[in-house]
Image (cartoon, grey):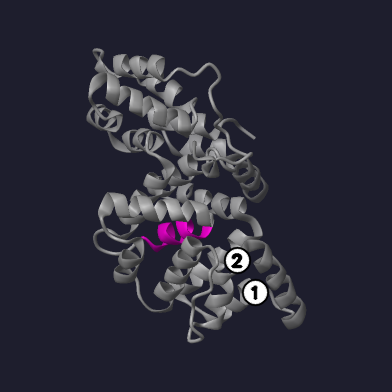
Amino acid sequence: MASMWVGHQGTIRDYPGFSASVDAEAIQKAIRGIGTDEKMLISILTERSNAQRQLIVKEYQAAYGKELKDDLKGDLSGHFEHLMVALVTPPAVFDAKQLKKSMKGTGTNEDALIEILTTRTSRQMKEISQAYYTVYKKSLGDDISSETSGDFRKALLTLADVLYNAGENRWGTDEDKFTEILCLRSFPQLKLTFDEYRAISQKDIADSIKGELSGHFEDLLLAIVHCVRNTPAFLAERLHRALKGAGTDEFTLNRIMVSRSEIDLLDIRTEFKKHYGYSLYSAIKSDTSGDYEITLLKICGGDD
C-alpha cells in the first residue's frame, strides 16, 4: 500500500470491513443491469480508499476478465465518467496522465504542469516519473523539454530533476540563482529563506518575483512560494478559480479533488472557507449537477 499518497487530513479513509470481491460483484451488477445503477457505483467508489479501490480493480479483472476502467468508460459519459475513472486509477498513473494531458495537443496547460510539480513530494514524483515512462515509453523530462521553453523550461526541469533525485545538487553555476534557490531547497529551508529575504530587503519574495519576472516562469516561481507557505491554501485558490466564472474547469476540479482526497482535502476546505467566506461544498453544489455533483460532494466529505 503506497502510504506516501496518504496524509492525515484526507476526507476518504479505508472502509472498515472491506471486501474486494463483494465490491467487485456489486459494481459488476451495477454496470451490467438494465440501466446503470450510478448510486451504487458512487457509494462504493467514494467510500473506499485508493488502496482499496486498486484491490477492487484487481478483483474485477480476475473475476470478469475486464478492466474496470474500460467498463466505466463504456457505461458512463462526460465529466462523471472522467471522475469515476480517476477514482480507480493509481495515484502515480493518474498524475502521469494529467501531466501528459497538459502537454498534449495545441498549447500546453502550464497551470496543471506547475500545480503537479510544485505540490507533489519527491517520493511521489519518483513514482510519477516511473509511471509516466511505463505508460508512454518516454521520459517526463524529455516531454517537458519539448513542450516548454526558456526560463520556464529550465525551472520546470530543475524542479522535476530535483524532486526525482531528492536534492542531489548536480547543477552547474550557469543556472539562474533565483531558480536554483527555489528549486533546490526543501520547503522548510525555503520558508526560512523567504523570512530572511523579507528581513533583509523589506520586501516580500512574492512581490519581488512579480516585479522582476513575467509569464509562466513567474507563475511557476510564485506557485513554489505559495506551496512552501501553505499548500492547502494554494490548492484552495486553484479550486476557487476552477469553480468561479462562466464555465467550470473540470480538469482542475477532478484532479485536485481526487488527488488530495486522502492527503489534505480537509485543510483545503478550511482554507477555502477562510479565504472566500463560503464552503467548497457549497461552491461545488452551485456549480455542478447530476451524478457528477453527487460524486464530488461525497469526495468533498461535508459542508463547512
> Which structural element holds mark 1?
helix
Task: Find residue 6 and report its horizontal and vertical position in percent.
Answer: 55, 40
Q: Count numbered badges in the picture.
A: 2
Report the residue at 56% width, 65% height from top: 224
Report the residue at 33% width, 38% height from top: 82
Task: Find residue 273 and report its horizontal and vertical position in percent.
Answer: 64, 44
Seen in the picture, residue 99 relative to 289 is either above or below; the reply is below
Q: Nearer the viewer, residue 117 or 84?
A: 117
Q: Residues within 10 Å of mark 1 (few under 14, many from 20)?
A: some
Check if mark 2's residue and mark 1's residue have beta carbons within 8 Å.
yes
**Which residue position holds label 1?**
205
For badge 2, the amino acid type reads Val
For badge 1, the amino acid type reads Ile
Report the residue at 44% width, 45% height from top: 253
Instruction: State which tag comes first along the sequence, 2 or 1.
Output: 1
**Which residue position holds label 2?**
225
